[in-house]
């Protein structure tokens, strides 16, 4: 959550802050406003007991009187409450002001949004872009596993944590709680009403079809183009976005970003498939984007060699075999000496040679 320069508070905001301080009690101290959107205001606060900074999100007073925004805010709280994942903003507390306006106390992420980074820096370095996509895919996989579709995946809703160097998904305000375990999901939009940023809407959202979690993967593909190229996948102006999503052909990302890894380019191409069932799942995307150094070790060893684990397990067998061979050599030499009653030089050297053989086998 990016910092915003302090501004003079309006009378309405002053009343809201006073009501928020009353609801939070003596446990928190509100420091400044971080940002304000069309639905809510976010404040920076300090939790006194733990000395940590937190973000407090409160629904705008005018919105609080409308049932739909209020229910969406409550749905966001429910979505956060069911998720415990390092790439999803953690919520510490949900409450209401005296007038029933809902608020959330959340983890404060020190850093800018990905949208802000792209505006300031342009396309991201390849390793950072891959890291952002991996973290977002991991967060979506966790949400989808709990029957939650985010429905608003875009750079403005992805924070870059400057301290941990991780991407964090936030703003589940229009998330859809999918029908799971026999429970019916509740529709909070009217038929024909488009909710979300038009630049990221999937074909099924534009057609007002039934939505699944794969709606997030379409927006994820667009986000992928943005972090790698600084541009979207379609050559379209604002008035043509709908046509682009419904019938446009994505540009070849490998021409826009030649150094992109082939598996990432293929993943993003599949995410933009107009047929939801042909898109990869978030879990598969997270596995594809896993950094090479964290990939699971291969069970296949190089030809003609033993794996380190196999060598470790067979080490006692190597030593035991060498000992048995040494004892055999010594016994054979002793038998020759007894049969022929001779004391040759090589006979007296049998013992040290056998001992050296055992040591050599152990080292090898």
Image (cartoon, rainbow, N blue to C red):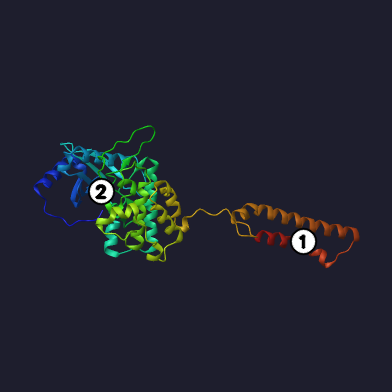
Residue that lies at the very extreme toward the left in this rendered image = 11
* Distance from Cα at disc 2 to Cα at disc 1: 75 Å
Q: Which residue is drawn at 45% across and 54% down?
A: 288
Query: Farthest bottom residue?
Result: 345
Q: Tell me whether the residue at label 2 lies in contact with that at label 1, contact meaning CB atoms closer than 8 angstroms.
A: no
Crowding around mark 2 (Cα neighbors within 10 Å: few <14, some 14 to 19, many 20+) is many
Q: Position of residue 302 (x, y in %)?
A: 61, 59
Residue pushed farthest top?
182
Nearer to me, 321 or 272: 272
- Kindly tell me whether residue 164 is visible in this rendering: no
Residue carrying label 1: 351
Quarter assignment of residue 330: bottom right
The residue to which callout 2 is attached is: 54
Badge 1: residue crowd in 10 Å (few <14, some 14–19, many ≥20): some
Write the residue at 27% across / 48% down.
196
Residue 274: which disc? none
Q: Is residue 320 left or right of residue 147?
A: right
Q: Say whether residue 343 is left or right of residue 90.
A: right
Image height check: is 255 above or below 90? below
For label 1, the SS is helix
Rendered position, 355 above or below 18: below
Location of the C terminus by quadrant is bottom right
Q: Which of marks 2 and 1 is nearer the N terminus?
A: 2
Q: Is residue 198 visible?
A: yes
Left or right for 140, reference 66: right
Residue 170 percent location from the top left of the image: 30, 49
Camera-near label (2 vs 1) is 2
User: What percent of the width, then of the height, locates residue 163?
Assistant: 32, 57
Depth order, front residue of 111/280:
280
Q: 288 or 33: nearer the eye?
A: 288
């Amino acid at each position: 959550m990016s910092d915003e320069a302090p501004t003079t508070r309006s009378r309405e905001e002053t009343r809201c802050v006073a009501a928020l301080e009353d609801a939070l009690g003596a446990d928190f101290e509100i420091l400044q406003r971080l940002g304000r959107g069309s639905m809510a205001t976010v404040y920076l606060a300090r939790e006194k007991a733990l000395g940590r900074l937190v973000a407090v999100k409160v629904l705008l007073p005018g919105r609080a009187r409308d049932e739909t925004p209020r229910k969406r805010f409550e749905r966001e709280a429910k979505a956060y409450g069911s998720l415990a994942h390092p790439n999803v903003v953690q919520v510490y507390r949900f409450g209401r002001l005296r007038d029933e306006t809902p608020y959330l106390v959340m983890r404060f992420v020190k850093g800018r949004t990905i949208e802000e980074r792209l505006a300031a820096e342009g396309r991201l370095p390849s390793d950072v872009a891959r890291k952002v996509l991996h973290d977002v895919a991991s967060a979506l996989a966790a949400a989808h596993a709990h029957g939650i579709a985010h429905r608003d995946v875009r750079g403005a809703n992805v924070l870059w944590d400057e301290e941990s160097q991780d991407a964090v998904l936030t703003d589940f305000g229009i998330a859809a709680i999918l029908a799971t375990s026999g429970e019916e999901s509740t529709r909070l939009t009217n038929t024909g009403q488009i909710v979300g940023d038009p630049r990221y809407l999937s074909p099924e959202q534009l057609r007002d079809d039934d939505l699944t979690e794969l709606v997030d993967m379409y927006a994820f593909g667009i986000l992928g183009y943005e972090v790698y190229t600084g541009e979207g996948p379609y050559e379209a102006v604002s008035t043509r976005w709908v046509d682009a999503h419904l019938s446009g052909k994505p540009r070849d990302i490998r021409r826009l970003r030649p150094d992109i890894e082939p598996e990432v380019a293929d993943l993003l191409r599949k995410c933009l498939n107009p047929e939801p069932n042909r898109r990869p799942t978030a879990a598969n995307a997270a596995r594809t984007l896993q950094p090479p150094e964290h990939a699971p070790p291969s069970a296949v060893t190089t030809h003609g060699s033993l794996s380190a684990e196999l060598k470790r397990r067979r080490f006692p067998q190597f030593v035991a075999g060498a000992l048995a061979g040494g004892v055999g050599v010594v016994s054979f030499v002793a038998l020759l000496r007894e049969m022929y009653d001779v004391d040759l030089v090589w006979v007296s050297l049998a013992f040290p040679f056998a001992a050296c053989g055992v040591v050599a086998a152990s080292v090898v």
